[in-house]
Image (spheres, rainbow, N blue to C red):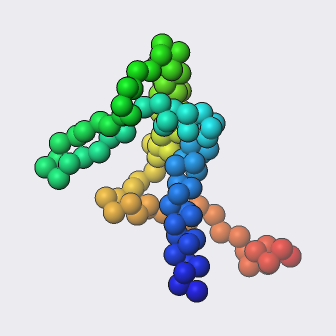
Amino acid sequence: MAEQVAAAVESARLMRPAMRMVALGLDFPTYLRFDFLVPHLTVSLNGKRIYLAPKGYAPTDEEFAFCLEFVVTAALRLAAAEAHQQDPAWLTRHRSGWVETEKVHELPASQEEGG
């Protein structure tokens, strides 16, 4: 059972990037091409950022344009998604994330049961 749980957790971890792309409305194969074309970031123990690319890395103008278009599209989709997640002006949210509520209407007991 522990092996099955570990396998499920690993599968979920591997699917996370795909789920993020799909949630933003981006085509996953397009993301995979983008990921293949760009250098990858690694951070050293002292915090230095190092970008790694295959030896001879030299993207064409077409590949650069593809990556630029992907980044712009992803940024616009992310901005739109974040805009939809903004709290309405009338909502009171406390620092802990708790939302203040109040009763706005109460149905008589006979209506609650569908009668």
> Which residue is rendered at x = 24% and y = 46% of the image?
43
Q: Is residue 79 above or below residue 11?
A: above
Could you say which is closer to the camera, residue 87 or residue 68? 68
- Residue 41 in which image quadrant: top left
What percent of the width, then of the height, locates residue 60? 47, 16
Residue at the extreme right: 115
What percent of the width, then of the height, locates residue 102? 50, 64
- Residue 54 in which image quadrant: top left
Q: Quadrant of the C terminus?
A: bottom right
Inspect this view and state whether residue 24 appears.
no
Could you say which is closer to the camera, residue 62 or residue 25? 62
Q: Is residue 40 above or below residue 115?
A: above
> Which residue is rendered at x = 38% and y = 60% of the image?
97
Q: Quadrant of the N terminus?
A: bottom right
Inspect this view and state whether residue 66 appears.
yes
> Which residue is rendered at x = 36% and y = 31% of the image?
55
> Which residue is rendered at x = 47% and y = 46% of the image?
87
Could you say which is closer to the camera, residue 108 or residue 38? 38
Q: Is residue 89 above or below residue 110?
A: above
What percent of the width, then of the height, locates residue 93? 39, 56
Residue at the extreme top: 61
